[in-house]
Image (cartoon, grey):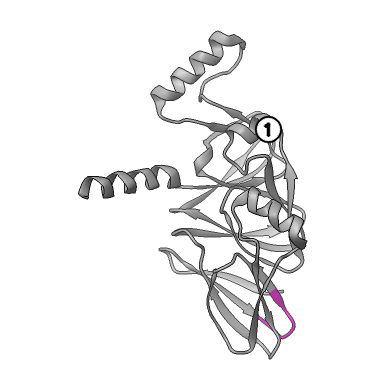
Amino acid sequence: MPIFTSTGEIDPFLHVSMTRGEKIYCESGAMVMMDSTLELKGKMTGGIGSAIMRRFANGESLFQQHIEATGGDGDCLLSPNMPGAIQILDIGERQYTLNDGAFVAATDKTEMKVRTQNIGNALFAGSGGFFVTETSGFGQVVVSGFGSMFQLDVEPGKDVIIDNTHVVCWDSRLRYEVSVTTGNNSGGGLGSMLGNIVNSAKSGEGIVLRFSGSGKICVCSRNRDSFASWVSKALGGSA
């Protein structure tokens, strides 16, 4: 199986070492360097339907890069689109659901499958609209997050609440629900809903995801939307 290694502490490369006949696939534009023994092709993985669904689910390009060691052993360097850390995930016994823009690369025995989610999560979670991407198969999948990354362990009876813009991926066995507040949502009713919205506006947290069950979650330190807004304001102010 190809060997994935994260190299460097700040905006690391993904170093991939392959022996003849091995292959990987990655997001379009991820390849930085490769040995001449490797061959690069652009493919619409899974056909037009799957490609379009992945495009809606996590912002992937319709065409992915497929790299194969056709001329002998070789290495390549890949880089995610956004600056930040890289996490290499073992896929098989544990599968993951990926947030928007998290996918970087995967070994060829894995697959990115798209499924629908409930309408509430689709409208408010910001995690792929009506579609989300789940891993399947066996091997490794590489994800990236804006800024540094940290892996959390969720335990039964100890729910975890995370701002949705900081979630990179999560164990597919975990249950999650969308909330507009970090408080207790018990009681229900219109008044409770309005109170949650007001509290969310005051706290500045916006939409959060409440995870329960048993499994792992990868989170990143930076909020892409807030950073983009800051850059826009800074450029506007200097114009």
Q: What stretch is highlighted in magenta?
A: 18-23
Return the x and y of residue 214 as percentages of the image width and height.
69, 39
**In the rendered view, does 235 fall on the left or right side of 4?**
left
When the figure is inspected, residue 115 is found, relative to residue 44, above or below; the finding is: above
User: Residue 174: x percent and y percent?
Assistant: 69, 39
Q: Which residue type does callout 1 highlight?
A: Pro
- Nearest to the observer: residue 140 or residue 67: 67
Q: Can residue 138 be seen in this view?
A: no
Does the stretch in magenta take in 19?
Answer: yes
Query: Which of the pair 6/46 is nearer the observer?
Result: 46
Q: Measuring from the top left, give residue 118's x and y in whole percent.
A: 71, 33
Q: Which quadrant of the figure has residue 223?
A: top left
Q: Where is residue 123 in the image (x, y as percent from the top left)?
A: 61, 33
Quarter of the image with the N terminus is bottom right
**Where is mark 1, residue-wise?**
156
Work out whether residue 228 or residue 238 is closer to the camera in this orientation and state it: 238
